[in-house]
Image (tube, grey):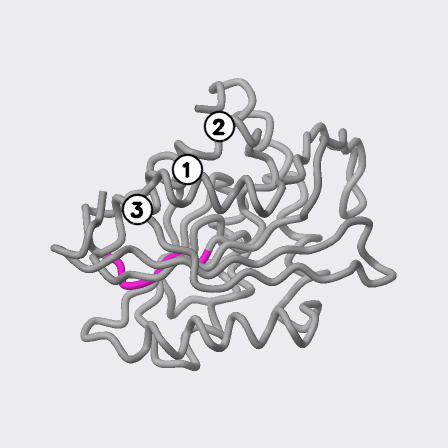
Amino acid sequence: MRSSGSAGRTATAYDLVAATYAAALPDDGFEAPLDRAMIADFAGRVARTTRCRVIDAGSGAGRMAPVLVRHGLQYTGVDLSQGMVDTARVDHPDQDFLQGSVTALPAPDGSADGVLSWYSVIHTDPDELPVVLAEFARVLRPDGLLLLGFQAGRGRREIHRAYGHDVALTAFLHEPCAVQRQLADAGFTTEATLVRRPRPSEKDDQAIILAALPAEGSGRR
């Protein structure tokens, strides 16, 4: 699990950039067409469940909320940064946003039909990712879906300036094959993996993995 110091620094950095982040990324317009297609498939499948409940784990300023709500989902956004949560509540007053960590989501066991983790693990060391995936598994019901987006590769990058502010952040790349293995260890079955080349605005390959928890009695760990 990330140390409280690391999590605290991450939260402080995003508190600082919350307003400019929300202005720069107000919606899903930045996403590539392939990314939006994966999100739409995920949201459409969650919308066909009985409760249609989705947790946006690492929701930031809530830019994915309209996308998911348009599919008829019952939305809850969770973010480590209280500044991001406050900004999201102003920009999306009809949706539910809570402060919390991806390692300790404020949700009961089996309460979600889907979890969206859209670039919310980029500050998680690959060795610590199993803790996060286990938490996603905890809040999902059997047959629940997880959509995980991240920068693909190996290594880390120190960020000292972002969204017009001086910050202190460490960003980690994750190897898709390693993430698939960690998902399996957490009880997930990978259904699809997309790895695309970076666009001019991106430095690294981008990866999206769609995974599901098996139904009860079908081998779920």
Residue under the image location 38 percent in, 57 percent down:
115
Q: Is residue 116 left or right of residue 199?
A: left
Q: Residues within 10 Å of mark 3 (few under 14, many from 20)?
A: many
Q: Residue 207 at x, y = what percent?
A: 63, 55
Q: Secondary structure at mark 2?
A: helix
Q: Residues within 10 Å of mark 2 (few under 14, many from 20)?
A: few
Instruction: Name the residue that disc number 3 marks.
Output: 137
- The range drawn in magenta is 112-116
Amino acid bearing label 1 = Val
Instruction: Name the residue that disc number 2 marks.
Output: 128
Relative to 51, residue 214 above or below: above
Residue 167 can be seen in this image:
yes
Please tell me in which quadrant of the rendered image residue 195 appears: bottom right
Q: Secondary structure at mark 3?
A: helix
The answer to whether residue 168 is magenta is no
Amino acid bearing label 2 = Glu
Q: Residues within 10 Å of mark 1 (few under 14, many from 20)?
A: many
Q: Answer with mark 1 or mark 3, whichever residue precedes in sequence.
A: 1
